[in-house]
Image: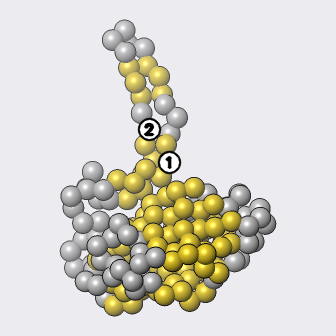
Amino acid sequence: MSSSGCYKVTATAENSCGDSANAAPVNNVFVTSCFAPIRQGEGTAAIWSSDLKLDGGRLQVVVNGDSVTYPDRGRTFGTSRLRGGENRMEATVVEGAGKGGSWRIDLGGSEAVAAGSLRVIAGEVESITSTAITFRLKGLAGERVAFVFVNKR
């Protein structure tokens, strides 16, 4: 595998008699490699984890207006290309059951993000650390949160 990212993993097991069975596919498996996920000359990347605790929830996450992902409920991982200096991450609830919940975004796995540089632009903050923010969510489609952080590279 030549790059990091989220993948869907499938497997088939075969015994010595030639019988085989297929395992159910596993989605959102985050794979890292010893190679940078962004090619040289394209800038640096942020590695992040998302933990969405929202009944029937799904987000649209946009980084710097061009990198888009759609994390579902539960824990998922992603990478996003960064600019030099300040970067912006926005999340919009695209599906929700109208019940309250939370979204935790953690940039601690990325060496490119300057610890302590997180600054909230929009949304109700439940907690904030030097590399992670937990937002309170109402669970309504269209609800938006946003923050900025600094790329230290």
Q: Which mark is residue 11?
A: none
Query: Residue under circle 1?
Result: 27
Label 2: how many residues lie within 10 Å, few (<14), some (14-19) or many (20+)? few
Q: CA distance from mark 1 to mark 2?
A: 9 Å
Give x and y (percent) for residue 147: 51, 84
Query: Residue, x 61% and y 86% (percent of image)?
Result: 122
Above-or-below relation of 114 to 137: below
Query: Residue, x 46% and y 73% (percent of image)?
Result: 132
Q: Is residue 27 left or right of residue 137?
A: left
Q: Is residue 97 left or right of residue 46?
A: right
Q: Secondary structure at mark 2?
A: loop
Q: Secondary structure at mark 1?
A: strand
Q: Quadrant of residue 113?
A: bottom left
Q: Nearer the viewer, residue 21 or 31?
A: 31
Above-or-below relation of 72 to 46: above
Query: Residue under circle 2?
Result: 10
Q: Quadrant of residue 52?
A: bottom right
* Amino acid bearing label 1: Asn
* Amino acid bearing label 2: Thr
Mark 1 / mark 2, whichever is N-terminal: 2
Q: Quadrant of residue 118?
A: bottom left
Give x and y (percent) for residue 149: 42, 85
Give x and y (percent) for residue 150: 37, 86
Q: Nearer the viewer, residue 122 or 25?
A: 122
